[in-house]
């Protein structure tokens, strides 16, 4: 069941990273905001979202079950 939570959390992080932290920084025109927006959009959001999605996928498939 926690796999679904991880996947939903990945979607929320992707939405938040793109719409709140990433794209608004490009509209300001300041160099420091552009650098921050690029780092968020190109580096951090894909890494965090991808990790949560993979973790959720493996949790749903039962990879983390401790039963022998």
Image (cartoon, rainbow, N blue to C red):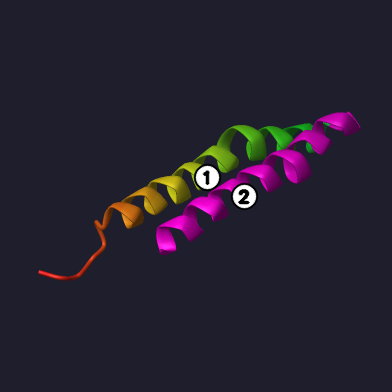
Q: Secondary structure at mark 2?
A: helix
Residue 17, given in percent of the width and then of the height, sits at: 67, 44
Q: Position of residue 32 (x, y in %)?
A: 80, 37
Left or right, 13 with respect to 49, comes to right
Q: Position of residue 50 (x, y in %)?
A: 47, 42
Which range of residues does the magenta coloring cover?
A: 1-30
Looking at the image, which residue is at 52% across and 45% down? Answer: 49
Taking the magenta stretch, the answer to whether it contains residue 52 is no
Give the vertical position of 26 relative to 18 (above or below).
above
Q: Secondary structure at mark 1?
A: helix
Please name whichever residue, 15 or 60, is drawn nearer the observer in this view of the structure: 60
Residue 3, compared with residue 34, is above or below; it is below
Q: Which residue does the image show at 87% across and 30% down from the upper left? A: 27
Q: Which residue is mark 2?
A: 13
Q: Residue furthest left?
A: 68
Farthest residue to the front: give it. Answer: 1
18 left or right, relative to 33: left
Q: Nearer the viewer, residue 64 or 24?
A: 64
Using the rendered view, name the quadrant where residue 62 is placed: bottom left
The residue located at (77%, 34%) in the rendering is 23
Q: CA distance from mark 2 to mark 1?
A: 6 Å
* Crowd around label 2: few <14 · some 14–19 · many ≥20 (10 Å): some
Whether residue 28 is in magenta: the answer is yes
Q: Looking at the rendering, which quadrant does residue 29 occupy? A: top right
Left or right of 8, for residue 22: right
Q: Position of residue 38 (x, y in %)?
A: 68, 32
Label 1 near label 2: C-beta < 8 Å? yes
Which residue is under mark 1?
49
Q: Quadrant of the N terminus?
A: bottom left
Q: Main secondary structure of the magenta part?
A: helix
Along the viewing direction, whichever of 63 and 42 lies nearer the viewer = 63
């Amino acid at each position: 069941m926690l796999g679904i939570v991880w996947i939903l959390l990945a979607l929320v992080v992707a939405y938040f990273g793109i719409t709140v932290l990433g794209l608004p920084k490009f509209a300001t025109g300041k160099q420091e905001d552009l650098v921050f927006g690029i780092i968020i959009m190109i580096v951090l959001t894909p890494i965090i979202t991808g990790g949560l999605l993979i973790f959720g996928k493996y949790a749903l498939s039962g990879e983390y079950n401790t039963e022998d």
